[in-house]
C-alpha cells in the first residue's frame, strides 16, 4: 500500500487519544459543517459517532471477507423488532476505546457523558421480544458467528411516553429526524408483490407452473447497521428494509391528469415501513401488519437466495449458506414465501423444495397467551397473498395426510393440528401462523425451561406428540456488556478486580465472586456501588420528574411493559395497603421504601392505561402526605426504554417479577436486575425459576401460586370476591381506591379495574395478594440487616 494511503487509513482506524481527537475534529467539520465553538451536543454526538464508525467499518469489511473465504454458514435472524438501545457507548465499549475517547474529549474540553446523552434511543421494538433480538445480535457478533439480523426500518418506532395528569400520553417517535450515523444505505433492492391473482401455465418441459399476477408491486431497499462483537475483530450486520415505490421519476409515465394518483402510489408503498405496531392491541390495522410481515420476509429471503446463488452456485445449496431463525410468528410467512420462491421463481419441484424448507428454518415461540398467537382471516390472506394461501393449503393437505396415518381416529386432534382454524359453525376461517411455523421448521424452542415444558404440554402439545425431537429449550439471556459494563461501570470494575475481566465474554466466571461473599471489605465496596447507582438514578429522576428521592431507602423496582398478567396492580395494592396501615397506626415500624415504576401500555389497552393512572394517583397522594412520605415514596419514571433502563437496573435493591405463574414466557429484565445485584421478589414463572436455582433460594423472595395451583384454583371455581371479603387488608386497599381518595373524589374512576378484580380477576391478583404482602414483610426484615 502506498505510504499516503496507508497513513490516511491509519488515522481513520487508529485508536490512540491523539488519532481519535484528530478524526473527531475532522468529522465535526466535514460531516456536520460546524466548528467546535458552534457545535451543539447533537453535532458533537454525530461527529463522535462517525469517528467510532470509521473504526468499525474496516473490521466489517474484513469480517465479511473472512466469512466469505471460509464459506461460513450465516444465521439469518428474522425479527419484526430489534430494540437496540443507544449505539455509541456500546460500540466504544466493544472497540475498547472508551478511555481514549474520554481523554480525547477532555483534551477538547468536552464532557463525554453529555455527548452520549444526545443519542436518542432507537426504539424499533415493543419490549422483551425486540430486546432479545438485539441481545442475540450482540452475542453472535461476540462469539464470532456469522449472523445477519433482518427486519424493518420503521420510520416511527415505539411511541415516546409522556405523563399528563397521571395518564399516559403517546408522542410519535421521529427517530430518523436527525439522521442516523450508524446506518449504511445499500443498493440491494427487491420487488414485493401484493394482491391480484394466480395463473397456471406450462413451462418448456410441459410441467404445470404458477404465475402470480399482482395488483401492486413495491420495493424494499436495504439499510445496514454494523454490529460489533466485544473485544474481537468481528462485525456482523443488521439489515433493515425500507419500503418504496418503484421510482419517483416513474411519475413521468403517468399522464399529467393522474399526478395525484401516482403520488398516492408512492405514499401507499412508503406506508408499509412507516410505523412499528404496538403489541397487546385489540384487532386493528391488521392488513398493514400482515403486509409489513410479508414485506420484510420477502426482501430478506430474496437477499439470502441472491447470496446463495453468488456463493454456492445454486439455490439447492441454501441450507449450506443459511439457517433462518424465526423470532416468533411475525416472520412465519417465510415458510410459504420460501416455497413460492423455490417453486415458482426457481422452478424447483415441490418435494425438493419442501425438504429444503424443513432443513432451513427454526422457530422460537415467545408466549402462551392465546391472544398473542397470531392468526389471519383467510379472506384477508386471499386478498393480500393469494399465491401463499394456495401454498399453505397444499402444505396443509400433505401434512394432514401424514398426521392422519398416526392419529386416524382423532378428528379433534387433526382439527387442532390443521394450519386452518375452521372457526365455530359459520365463523371466520383463519390461518394459524404458529402451526405453519411448526410444520415448516426443523426446531422449535421456548424461551425458558418452564415455558418450553408448558409449550410441549399445552399450546403445542399436538406438535410435540408428533415430533418430540423438534422441541428444545433455549432460555433467554441478556448481554453483560450493555447491562453491566455500560450500565454500571463501578460494578464492572469491582468484577474485573476480583475475578479478572473474562466475565464479559463468559458470565459464569462471576461464580468466583462467591468466595468473597463474607469478606467485609468486599461487602463494603459492593454496598457503596449500589449506593452510587441509587444516587445516580435519584439525580436523574430529580431532573426529569422533579421528585427528590432518598437513596438510603429500599429501592423496590418494577419496570417492564404494563400488562395485567405482569400484575403492576398487585404491586400497587401492596402500596395502598401499606399506606392504609400507616395512616391507621402512624408509628407502625416499616422499612422505608421507594417504589419505582416504569413501562409503556399499548395505546389501545385501556386497563393497562388505567393501571398507570392509578400508580401516578397513588404516588401523588402519598407525596402530599407529609407523615407517610417519610417512609413511603412512589415514582413513575416516564418513557421506560433501553436508555432509561440502563440507569434503573443498577439502582434496584428489589426486583419485582410478579406475573401470574404460567404467563411470563421468560422475562429478561429479571436477569438484568439480578446481574446488578438486586434480589428478586417473584413467582415461579418464566426464567425466575432458573434465576432462583442459580442464586439460591435464600436470595429469592418467593410467593404466589404455582402453575399447578393456578390451574387448581380455576378448576375449583375461583371467586375473588370471597377472597376480598375474607382478607381485611385486601378489602381496605380496594375500598380505599374506590373511596375517591386517589381520584379527587371520583369514586367511579378506578371501578373498571376494581370491578374486574372482584368479578373475574383473570390473573389471580386477589388470590396471590396475601402471600405477596407477607413476602414483602420478609423483604422489610431482610433489608434491615445489611
Ligand atoms: C415476550 C415474553 C417475555 C420474553 C420475551 C423474549 C412476546 C410475544 N413475548 O416473557 O412475554 O422474555 O418475549 O422471549 O413479546
Image (spheres, rainbow, N blue to C red):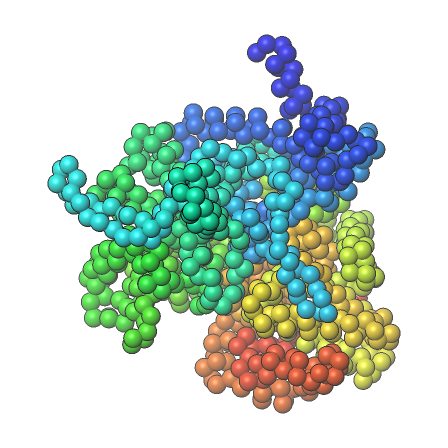
Q: Is residue 629 visible?
A: yes
Image quadrant in which the C terminus is located: bottom right
Point 27% across, 38% down: residue: 346
Point 32% across, 68% down: residue: 429
Position of 565 relative to 92 (above/below): below
Indicate the position of residue 477 as horizontal and vertical percent values. Answer: 55, 51
Quarter of the rendering containing residue 500: top right
Lateral position of residue 528 relative to residue 615, left or right: right
Indicate the position of residue 61 as horizontal and vertical percent values. Answer: 52, 27
* Residue reaching furthest to the front: 257
Position of 476 relative to 727 (above/below): above
Indicate the position of residue 261 as horizontal and vertical percent values. Answer: 43, 50
Point 66% across, 66% down: residue: 168
* Residue reaching furthest to the top: 2
Lateral position of residue 317 relative to residue 743, left or right: left
Q: Nearer the viewer, residue 391 or 507?
A: 391
Lateral position of residue 738 relative to residue 567, left or right: right
Amino acid at each position: 500500500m502506498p505510504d499516503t494511503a496507508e497513513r490516511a487509513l491509519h488515522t481513520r482506524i487508529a485508536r490512540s487519544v491523539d488519532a481519535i481527537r484528530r478524526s473527531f475534529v475532522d468529522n465535526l467539520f466535514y460531516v456536520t459543517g460546524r466548528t467546535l465553538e458552534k457545535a451543539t451536543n447533537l453535532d458533537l454526538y454525530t461527529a463522535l459517532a462517525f469517528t467510532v464508525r470509521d473504526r468499525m467499518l474496516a473490521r466489517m469489511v474484513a469480517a465479511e471477507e473472512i466469512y466469505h473465504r471460509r464459506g461460513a454458514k450465516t444465521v439469518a435472524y428474522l425479527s419484526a423488532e430489534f430494540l437496540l438501545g443507544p449505539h455509541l457507548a456500546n460500540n466504544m465499549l466493544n472497540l475498547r476505546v472508551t478511555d481514549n475517547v474520554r481523554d480525547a474529549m477532555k483534551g477538547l474540553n468536552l464532557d463525554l457523558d453529555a455527548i452520549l446523552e444526545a443519542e436518542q434511543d432507537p426504539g424499533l421494538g415493543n419490549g422483551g421480544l425486540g430486546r432479545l433480538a438485539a441481545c442475540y445480535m450482540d452475542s453472535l457478533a461476540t462469539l464470532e458467528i456469522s449472523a445477519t439480523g433482518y427486519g424493518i426500518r420503521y420510520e416511527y418506532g415505539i411511541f415516546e411516553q409522556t405523563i399528563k395528569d397521571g395518564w399516559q400520553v403517546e408522542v410519535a417517535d421521529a427517530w430518523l429526524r436527525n439522521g442516523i450515523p450508524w446506518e449504511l444505505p445499500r443498493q440491494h433492492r427487491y420487488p414485493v408483490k401484493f394482491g391480484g391473482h394466480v395463473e397456471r401455465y406450462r413451462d418448456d418441459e410441459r410441467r404445470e407452473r404458477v404465475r402470480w399476477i399482482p395488483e401492486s408491486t413495491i420495493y424494499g431497499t436495504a439499510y445496514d447497521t454494523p454490529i460489533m462483537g466485544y473485544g474481537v475483530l468481528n462485525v456482523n450486520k443488521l439489515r433493515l428494509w425500507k419500503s418504496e415505490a418503484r421510482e419517483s421519476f416513474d411519475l413521468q409515465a403517468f399522464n399529467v391528469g393522474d399526478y395525484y394518483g401516482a403520488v398516492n402510489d408512492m405514499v401507499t408503498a412508503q406506508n408499509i415501513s412507516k410505523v412499528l405496531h404496538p403489541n397487546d392491541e385489540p384487532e386493528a390495522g391488521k392488513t398493514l401488519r400482515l403486509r409489513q410481515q410479508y414485506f420484510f420476509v420477502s426482501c430478506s429471503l430474496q437477499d439470502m437466495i441472491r447470496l446463495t446463488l453468488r456463493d454456492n452456485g445454486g439455490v439447492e445449496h441454501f441450507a449450506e449458506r443459511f439457517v433462518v431463525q424465526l423470532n416468533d410468528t411475525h416472520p412465519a410467512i417465510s415458510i410459504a414465501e420460501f416455497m413460492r420462491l423455490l417453486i415458482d421463481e426457481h422452478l424447483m419441484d415441490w418435494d425438493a423444495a419442501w425438504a429444503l424448507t424443513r432443513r432451513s428454518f427454526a422457530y422460537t415461540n415467545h408466549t402462551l397467551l392465546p391472544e398473542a398467537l397470531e392468526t389471519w382471516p383467510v379472506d384477508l390472506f386471499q386478498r393480500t397473498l393469494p399465491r401463499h394461501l394456495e401454498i399453505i393449503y397444499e402444505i396443509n393437505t400433505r401434512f394432514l395426510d401424514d398426521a392422519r396415518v398416526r392419529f386416524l381416529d382423532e378428528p379433534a386432534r387433526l382439527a387442532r393440528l390443521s394450519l386452518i382454524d375452521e372457526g365455530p359453525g359459520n365463523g371466520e376461517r383463519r390461518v394459524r401462523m404458529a402451526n405453519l411455523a411448526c410444520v415448516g421448521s426443523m426446531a422449535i424452542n421456548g424461551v425458558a425451561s418452564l415455558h418450553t415444558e408448558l409449550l410441549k404440554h399445552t399450546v403445542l402439545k399436538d406438535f410435540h406428540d408428533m415430533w418430540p425431537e423438534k422441541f428444545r429449550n433455549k432460555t433467554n439471556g441478556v448481554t453483560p456488556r450493555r447491562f453491566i459494563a455500560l450500565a454500571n461501570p463501578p460494578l464492572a470494575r469491582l468484577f474485573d478486580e476480583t475475578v479478572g475481566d473474562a466475565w464479559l465474554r463468559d458470565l459464569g466466571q462471576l461464580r468466583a465472586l462467591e468466595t468473597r461473599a463474607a469478606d467485609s471489605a468486599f461487602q463494603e465496596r459492593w454496598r457503596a456501588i449500589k449506593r452510587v447507582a441509587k444516587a445516580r438514578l435519584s439525580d436523574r429522576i430529580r431532573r426529569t420528574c422533579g421528585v427528590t428521592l432518598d437513596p438510603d431507602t429500599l429501592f423496590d423496582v418494577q419496570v417492564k411493559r404494563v400488562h395485567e398478567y405482569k400484575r403492576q396492580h398487585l404491586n400497587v395494592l401492596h402500596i395502598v395497603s401499606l399506606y392504609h396501615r400507616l395512616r391507621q397506626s402512624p408509628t407502625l415500624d416499616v422499612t422505608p421504601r421507594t417504589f419505582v415504576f416504569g413501562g409503556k401500555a399499548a395505546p389501545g389497552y385501556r386497563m393497562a392505561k388505567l393501571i398507570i393512572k392509578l400508580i401516578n394517583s397513588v404516588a401523588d397522594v402519598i407525596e402530599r402526605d407529609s407523615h407517610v412520605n417519610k417512609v413511603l415514596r412512589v415514582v413513575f419514571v416516564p418513557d421506560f426504554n433501553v436508555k432509561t433502563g440502563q440507569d434503573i437496573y443498577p439502582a434496584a435493591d428489589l426486583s419485582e417479577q410478579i406475573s401470574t405463574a404460567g404467563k411470563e414466557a421468560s422475562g429478561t429484565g429479571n436477569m438484568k436486575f439480578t446481574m446488578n445485584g438486586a434480589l428478586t421478589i417473584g413467582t415461579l414463572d418464566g426464567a425466575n425459576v432458573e434465576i432462583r436455582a442459580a442464586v439460591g433460594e435464600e436470595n429469592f423472595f418467593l410467593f404466589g401460586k404455582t402453575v399447578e395451583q393456578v390451574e387448581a384454583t380455576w378448576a375449583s371455581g375461583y371467586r375473588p370476591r370471597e377472597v376480598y371479603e375474607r382478607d381485611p387488608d385486601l378489602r381496605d386497599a380496594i375500598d380505599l381506591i374506590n373511596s375517591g381518595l386517589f381520584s379527587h373524589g371520583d369514586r367511579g374512576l378506578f371501578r373498571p379495574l376494581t370491578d374486574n378484580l372482584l368479578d373475574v380477576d383473570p390473573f389471580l391478583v386477589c388470590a396471590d395478594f396475601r402471600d405477596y404482602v407477607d413476602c414483602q414483610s420478609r423483604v422489610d426484615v431482610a433489608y434491615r440487616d445489611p
